[in-house]
Amino acid sequence: AVAALVAAAHEATARTAFDEAAAHLRRAVDLVGGLTAADLATLCEYGDVLRRAGQGGDARATLLGAAERARAACDAALFARAAFGAHRVTTVTESSRSEVIALLDEALAALEREGAADGDPARWLLSASLARELADGPDRDLPRAVDFARAAVDGARRTGDAGVLAYALFA
């Protein structure tokens, strides 16, 4: 049943029916015992779909919970995915993003500790995300933002991944 619900969520997402996808994933999460029992990849996907459906508060809580569990499990890849997802949740202009900045910093460090290859797209997505977070708002740190943006663009070019490069250039 869970696999069918996840497949239905993928199909709904492909049709940009994000509310429907979120409902399918919510049922899948409930079937396995809730947010603390669901696998981390499904939680990250659920958080992203909630974000796309305009449910920012729930998306943020889901992604921060997934990041906490990934951190505890020492799963750098899923930690990076959850941190990237949390970065993408919108906030009120000029509100502090210090929690997300710290999460992105920690996720990037975890990838580097695990020896993330120079060609690992997650590394450059996190670097670009940090550049964006540090470029504006009350936690602004322009010199650091510029360093992260340069590293993200250079690294993304080396990956050959056009989507990662576009994201890095936007930083």
Image: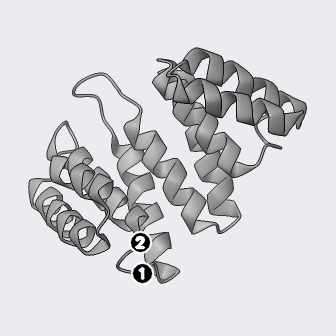
Query: x and y percent of residue 73 in the render?
Result: 71, 64
Query: x and y percent of residue 167 in the render?
Result: 26, 50
Query: x and y percent of residue 160 in the render?
Result: 28, 69
Query: x and y percent of residue 31 in the render?
Result: 89, 31
Q: Judge left or right: residue 6 versus residue 89.
A: right
Q: In whole angstroms, how far apart are the C-alphas of marks 1 and 2?
A: 5 Å
- Crowding near the residue tagged with mark 1, few <14, some 14–19, many ≥20 C-alpha atoms within 10 Å: few
Measuring 18% from the left and 71% from the top, which residue is drawn there?
154
- Crowding near the residue tagged with mark 2, few <14, some 14–19, many ≥20 C-alpha atoms within 10 Å: some
Tell me the tag on residue 38.
Answer: none
Give the structural element (helix, strand or loop) at label 1. loop
Q: Quadrant of residue 162?
A: bottom left
Q: Which of 88 and 102 is in front in this view?
A: 88
Give the structural element (helix, strand or loop) at label 2. loop
- Residue at which label 2 appears: 120
Q: Can residue 130 be seen in this view?
A: no
In the displayed structure, 150 sits above or below 8; it is below
Q: In which quarter of the image is residue 61?
A: top right
Do the residues bearing badges 1 and 2 touch, measured as CB atoms within 8 Å? Answer: yes
Tag 2: amino acid: Asp
Q: Judge left or right: residue 28 versus residue 119.
A: right
Q: Quadrant of residue 79?
A: bottom right
- Residue at which label 1 appears: 117
In the displayed structure, 46 sits above or below 116; it is above
Q: Which of 21 and 131 is in front in this view?
A: 21
In the displayed structure, 12 sits above or below 89; it is above
Measuring 9% from the left and 61% from the top, which residue is drawn there?
143
Q: Is residue 81 visible?
A: yes
Tag 1: amino acid: Ala
